[in-house]
Amino acid sequence: MGSEEANAFDAKDAPKIAGELRESFASGKTRSYEWRTSQLKTILKILDNHEQDMILALRSDLSKPEMESYIQEIAMLKNSCKATLKSLKGWMVPEKAKTSMTTFPSSAEIVSEPLGVILIISAWNYPFYLSIDPVIGAIAAGNAVVLKPSEVSPASSALLAKLLKEYMDTSCVRVVEGAVAETAALLQQKWDKICYTGNGRVGRIVMEAAAKHLTPVLLELGGKSPVVVDSDVNLKFATHAVTFYVKVATRRIIAGKWGCNNGQACISPDYIITTKDFAPKLVDSLKEVLEKFYGKNPLESKDLSRIVNSNHFARLMKLLDEEKVSGKVVHGGERNETDLKIAPTILLDVPRDSLIMTEEIFGPLLPIITVEKVEESYDIINSGPKPLAAYLFTSNEKLKKQFVMTISAGGVVVNDTTIHLAVVTLPFGGVGESGMGAYHGKFSFEAFSHKKAVVYRSFVADAAVRYPPYTKGKLSL
Ligand code: NAD
């Protein structure tokens, strides 16, 4: 695991850590605007000063291409932090609320107060973004924070522990490294909110532990995010439009799948649904663009992340080599177990009851299932657990509206993939089995605040009708 100092966390120290942070929170220090902004500016400083260290850690954990590391982790965090700093003062101002005749004369407001001490447990696939972004929200809302990064990305986890210890106010912001035993010890403590990012199995463990203390949870989970590709394009521009449409759709599907950690991203396209007649055209286009992006031997490409570890490699091989899907590979399938590399792989017409169509893939395999009419996709998607994201490519306005209204998913993007994550004015979160609650931007501030209802009354107009004895005369008033 990580650095020697960071390794200092021992499961039996969990109560001490929780106690120390609770004391700091009780001192009131984290509530001031000045403390919040100084910590957020410190995060920006860490991001500026240690960009290269983060890129190297991501290379060590995932062989992640530098450009992806910068755009998808560092730049995203800088934007989030800057946007929060810009708006925080406004978010902290109590919101006026209308009162009614019942309470006349009075005024009312909604005051956002910090919840207290927040536990953030994050995942390995975007180890910096998934750790620091909720920390930004928790600090902005005036809380103390304990962050537990993932042991599956040890270099990033160690760097987070080292940098946050070196730069941040450690009386209120603490990083503890650890795996299952350490996380379980943390989960036994009382927190004021737990923010967990990862799979649904552990999500259930987190929720069970939280229930013991009636602690609210923000669960950022995953699922099978579909991409529906419609063959109907606006033919106003004749045949060129068809080619243009397929090419743009292809590039954007590839960027969201293989361009995001080689498919190891929670909102990466998991599978495609398209019409039988359109599938060959889409497959040809995917093959052509994949070769352009990653060359003839993608296992050698420097622009593709590796699989994070041998357990995940074996898990993906099991999905790929299942008897039900053997023979369905129409592109890729190459692997290098020593380097933990898997080439972008496309499978066509896989059975819906195969493993690859029933489990979240979380890797570079992309199955395509075909239908007669694109509208059949609604039942296919809605018959499974609600996905974290759903994507549609079409120029048909009616279909766009239908899709948005019919598909229940954490988020929907029409004519692109994954980019909703970068829109800080949108909430990010799942629904059903893909998660509970949402964060990003103002939604992070709200996720880590309590909206306190406050009424200010005057001593005048103290209506007698409210008090006993409840005489008939008072009723007729
Ligand atoms: P992971 O293995 O890093 O686990 C996540 C966290 O849970 C880690 O900090 C780990 O230490 C902890 N953990 C693991 N087992 C535990 C246990 N038994 N008890 C307590 N804590 C435990 O990550 P993962 O689960 O492999 O992540 C992949 C999943 O996360 C996918 O399903 C993906 O879709 C989802 N995900 C969701 C988001 C999102 O924002 N919604 C982002 C990234 C990943």
Image (cartoon, rainbow, N blue to C red):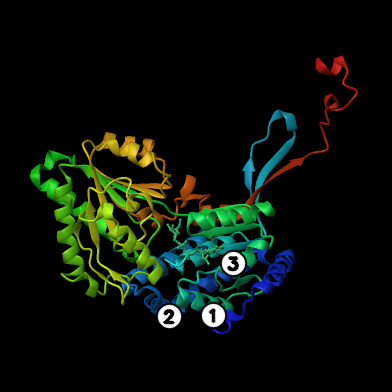
For the residues labelled 3 and 1, the Cα–Cα distance comes to 19 Å
Q: Of circles 3 and 2, which is in front?
A: 3
Q: Which mark is residue 53?
A: 2
| Residue located beneath label 3 in the image | 183
| Residue located beneath label 1 in the image | 162
Q: Residue type at mark 3: give it.
A: Thr
Q: Which mark is residue 234?
A: none
Whether residue 117 is visible to the viewer of this picture, yes or no, is: yes
**Precedes in sequence: disc 3 or disc 1:** 1
Does residue 470 lie above or below 247 as drawn?
above
- Is disc 1 surrounded by few (<14), some (14 to 19) or many (20+) residues within 10 Å? some
Looking at the rendering, which quadrant does residue 4 occupy? bottom right
Q: Residue type at mark 2: give it.
A: Asp
Q: Position of residue 252 (x, y in %)?
A: 26, 56
Q: Residue type at mark 1: give it.
A: Lys
Does residue 89 lie above or below 180 as drawn?
above
Q: Position of residue 227 (x, y in %)?
A: 30, 48
Quarter of the rendering occupied by the C terminus: top right
The front one of 112 and 353 is 353
Looking at the rendered structure, the secondary structure element under dot 2 is helix
**Precedes in sequence: disc 3 or disc 2:** 2
For the residues labelled 2 and 1, the Cα–Cα distance comes to 11 Å
Looking at the rendering, which quadrant does residue 125 occupy? bottom left
Looking at the rendered structure, the secondary structure element under dot 3 is helix
**Residue depicted at 53% across the width and 78% down the height:** 163
| Ligand 1 neighbours mark 1 (CB distance < 8 Å) | no
